[in-house]
Image (spheres, rainbow, N blue to C red):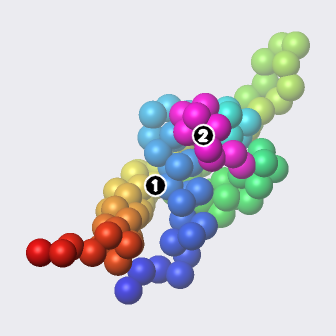
Amino acid sequence: MFSPELKKGGKELLVLSLLDECDRHGYDIGKLIEERSAGRLVFQISSLYPTLSRLENRGWISGRWVEKAGERRRRFYRLTKKGRAGLRETTANWHEYISAMQQVLEPSHA
């Protein structure tokens, strides 16, 4: 019933939801996931780049290089219109998945 991509979709969902707030670079995304989850979700920063690349190839995000004097060049990503629709669909699927898991793990005794 659920997409076989659901497991890795969790990482995609987190990235998309953070980009829905504002443009961000990969390091910022990784640190925010860790901070907002109180350290329970930690991704190696290098593992986020294939996810960002996959989302960019899908047309859900777009990236641009930004250079500032005295700083390293960084690639900032933003959510596209297609990405916003994908975020809504992915969020709905994730909620359905969690609901189905809870029904199995915590069956009603009514």
Q: Which of these two is toward me, 46 or 66?
A: 46
Residue at image coords 38%, 72%: 105
Name the residue at the bottom extreme: 1
- Left or right: 45, with 93 as reference point: right
Using the rendered view, name the quadrant where residue 1 is placed: bottom left
Q: Position of residue 68 (x, y in %)?
A: 78, 18
Q: Which residue is mark 2?
A: 33
Q: Is residue 105 above or below residue 89?
A: below
- Left or right: 24, with 102 as reference point: right
Magenta residues, dominant SS class:
loop
First in sequence, mark 2 or 1: give its number: 2
Q: Position of residue 78 (x, y in %)?
A: 55, 41
Residue at image coords 27%, 75%: 107
- Secondary structure under tag 1 reads helix
Dot 1, how many residues are within 10 Å of its Cα: few (below 14), some (14-19), or many (20+)? many
Residue at image coords 66%, 53%: 52
Dot 2, how many residues are within 10 Å of its Cα: few (below 14), some (14-19), or many (20+)? some
Q: Which residue is mark 1?
A: 83
- Left or right: 81, with 19 as reference point: left
Q: Is residue 64 in view from this perspective?
A: no
**Residue 13 belongs to magenta span:** no
Q: CA distance from mark 2 to mark 1?
A: 19 Å
Q: Which residues are magenta?
A: 33-43
**Residue 35 belongs to magenta span:** yes
Three-letter residue code for mark 1: Gly
